[in-house]
Image: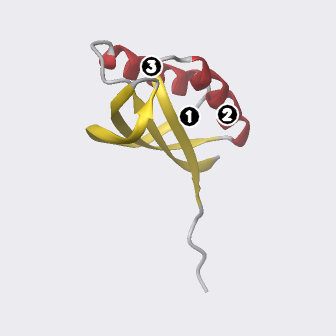
């Protein structure tokens, strides 16, 4: 299992808590372990996305198998309340 940092930008609407719950259920469905969650909150976007000028930012540190990332990506693309998301693989520090 690899470690990833996942940044998700959600629509800042009244279904925000439901969307967060759905995202975490998707993690469980595909065997991802949530190590930490950093909630940045509502922030202004650099440019409008689907007529939204603000987004709700969440930063997850997760552990998941590489094929799990593909499955998570395909499910996140189907959710209309997710404006953008980005997976970044965290490399383990190697000792000299």
In percent of width and height, residue 94 lies at 60, 75
Distance between mark 3 and mark 2 Cα atoms: 21 Å
Q: Residue at x 42, y 40 (%)?
A: 47
Residue named by callout 1? 32
Q: Quadrant of residue 74?
A: top right
Disc number for residue 85: none
Disc number for residue 68: 2
Disc 1 versus disc 3: nearer the observer: 3
In percent of width and height, residue 52 lies at 37, 26
| Marked residue nearer the N-terminal end (3 or 2) | 2
Residue extending farthest to the bottom is 96
The residue tagged with tag 1: helix, strand or loop? loop
Task: Say which of 64 and 81 sits in front.
Answer: 81
Callout 1: 10 Å neighbours few (<14), some, many (20+)?
many
Residue named by callout 3? 81
Q: Quadrant of residue 45?
A: top left
Disc 3 versus disc 2: nearer the observer: 3
Q: Is the residue under label 2 in contact with that under label 1 (CB below 8 Å)?
A: yes
The residue tagged with tag 3: helix, strand or loop? loop
Distance between mark 1 and mark 2 Cα atoms: 7 Å
| Marked residue nearer the N-terminal end (1 or 2) | 1
Lateral position of residue 58 relative to residue 72, left or right? left
Lateral position of residue 69 relative to residue 56, left or right? right
Callout 3: 10 Å neighbours few (<14), some, many (20+)?
some
Residue extending farthest to the right is 67
The quarter in which the C terminus is drawn is bottom right
Q: Is the residue under label 2 in contact with that under label 3 (CB below 8 Å)?
A: no
Q: Residue at x 37, y 38 (%)?
A: 58
Lateral position of residue 62 relative to residue 75, left or right? left
| Marked residue nearer the N-terminal end (1 or 3) | 1
């Amino acid at each position: 299992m690899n470690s990833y940092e996942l940044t998700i930008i959600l629509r800042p609407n009244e279904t925000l808590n439901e969307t967060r719950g759905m995202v975490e259920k998707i993690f469980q469905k595909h065997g991802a372990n949530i190590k930490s969650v950093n909630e940045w909150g509502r922030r202004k976007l650099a440019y409008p996305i689907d007529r939204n000028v603000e987004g709700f930012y969440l930063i997850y540190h997760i552990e998941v198998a590489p094929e799990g990332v593909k499955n998570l990506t395909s499910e996140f693309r189907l959710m209309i309340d997710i404006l953008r998301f980005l997976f970044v693989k965290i490399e383990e520090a190697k000792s000299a």
